[in-house]
């Protein structure tokens, strides 16, 4: 058996990873005090499954992913646990993290141009990660990189080219190839189609879905696109203002949301009209996200929620656990079916403008 075949066999034998995040809190240090970007977040990714982490910009999704890779700025406060196959990877030393990155957990970044070094050819950047963790020759590492290029739909001959010679979609595919090079058990896809046109977005997501189906790696997909989550993820966690406000099996959460924020997200997303009916109008969520330098006392969505009461504004609902069943951080989730019907009317949300 050749050296490349032995490497491929060794990497294929890696199992999909199990990730359990418990009570993760992250605060950035600022001159005005700590900015609580993530607050008491818990979720679980089963081996071989995909979790969709969704929410509007600034809700803390990317911060969660960066914490799992140990990429947060120095001085950032991090608490809680992130168990990767039973080992807590939060707070590991840089040396210990280097043994985890790419081999056990790999990142597909949202900005391929910024994540690729402009002065090295793509092939050298992919082989560098392989050579750092596997005792193989550069020729074998290069052959592995060619295989990864083939998987993402790029010709191996272009490994000798530089990032600026690739289009945006091709650079994103190159980043995916790099993330796949050591067959890590857990892939973190952080808004992988940001800044791409709609056609290229669809191509990249189709490629990611195909790779996931073939390789059965565990994955956390960070996105604001509910349609992508519906197509790709078995489970979903909806984030708002640094917290997970609803989580559970994707189909259940999207068909019967229990949190008003999830209902509002659905209203703001275009849907194909049912035969014989007119297209449903888009309904935006009024207001703005609260300032996380000074988070509100009660529910963080209360200032924008049409169903909020004095209880919501004075007492925060219970945080979500790692339960596999659907749950929501809302005082009134027992009235979810009533709220869903009312939430589909634009007038329900309009009065919050004042």
Image (tube, rainbow, N blue to C red):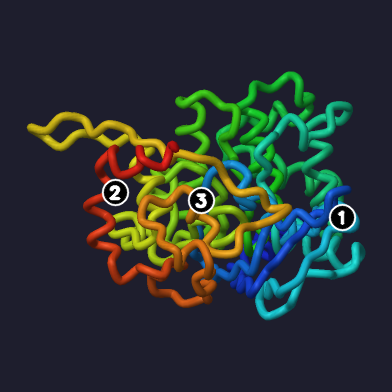
Q: What numbered label is drawn on residue 132?
A: 1
Question: As drawn, is 285 to the left or to the right of 85?
Answer: left
**SS class of the residue under badge 2?**
helix
In front here: 284 or 123? 284
> Residue 181, how many percent across, how many down?
70, 50
Which residue bears the numbered disc 3? 54
Horizontal arrangement in the rendering, residue 60 relative to residue 141 (left or right): left
**Mark with earlier residue (1, 2):** 1
Q: Nearer the viewer, mark 1 or mark 2?
A: 2
Could you tell me how far apart the alpha carbons at marks 2 and 3 are, in whole angstroms?
A: 20 Å
Q: Position of residue 29 (x, y in %)?
A: 85, 54
Q: Image point 51% across, 43% down: which residue?
A: 224
Q: Residues within 10 Å of mark 1 (few under 14, many from 20)?
A: few
Q: Which label is found at residue 343? A: 2
Nearer to me, 83 or 60:
60
Say whether residue 220 is visible: yes
- Bin the neighbour count of mark 3 within 10 Å (Cα to Cα): few under 14, some 14-19, many 20 and up: many
Lower sequence index among marks 2 and 3: 3
Q: How far apart are marks 1 and 2 (CA)?
A: 53 Å
Quick check: 123 left or right of 280?
A: right
């Amino acid at each position: 058996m050749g050296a490349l075949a032995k490497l491929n066999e060794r990497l294929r034998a890696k199992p999909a990873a199990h990730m359990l995040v418990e009570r993760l809190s992250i605060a950035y240090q600022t001159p005005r005090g700590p900015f609580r970007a993530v607050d008491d977040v818990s979720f679980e990714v089963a081996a071989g499954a995909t979790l969709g982490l969704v929410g509007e910009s600034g809700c803390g999704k990317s911060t969660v992913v960066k914490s799992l890779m140990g990429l947060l700025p120095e001085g950032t406060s991090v608490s809680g646990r992130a168990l990767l196959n039973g080992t807590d990877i939060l707070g590991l030393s840089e040396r210990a993290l280097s043994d985890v990155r790419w081999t056990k957990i790999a990142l597909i970044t949202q900005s391929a141009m910024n994540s690729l070094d402009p002065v090295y050819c793509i092939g050298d950047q992919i082989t560098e990660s392989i050579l750092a963790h596997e005792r193989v020759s550069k020729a074998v590492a290069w052959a592995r990189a060619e295989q990864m290029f083939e998987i993402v739909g790029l010709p191996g001959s272009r490994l000798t080219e530089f990032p600026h010679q690739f289009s945006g979609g091709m650079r994103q595919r190159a980043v995916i190839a790099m993330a796949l090079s050591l067959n890590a058990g857990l892939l973190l896809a952080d808004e992988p189609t940001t800044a791409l046109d709609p056609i290229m977005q669809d191509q990249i997501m189709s490629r990611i879905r195909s790779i996931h189906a073939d390789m059965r790696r565990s994955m956390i997909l960070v996105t604001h696109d509910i349609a992508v989550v519906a197509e790709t993820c078995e489970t979903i966690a909806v984030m708002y203002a640094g917290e997970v406000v609803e989580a559970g099996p994707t189909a259940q959460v999207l068909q019967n949301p229990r949190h008003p924020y999830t209902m509002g997200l659905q209203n703001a997303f275009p849907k194909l009209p049912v035969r014989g009916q007119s297209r449903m109008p888009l309904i935006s969520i009024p207001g703005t996200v609260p300032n996380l330098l000074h988070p509100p006392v009660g529910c963080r969505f209360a200032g924008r929620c049409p169903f909020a009461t004095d209880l919501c504004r004075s007492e925060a609902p219970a945080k979500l656990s790692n339960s596999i069943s659907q749950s929501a951080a809302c005082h009134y989730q027992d009235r979810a079916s009533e709220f869903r019907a009312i939430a589909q009317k634009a007038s329900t949300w309009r009065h919050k403008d004042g």
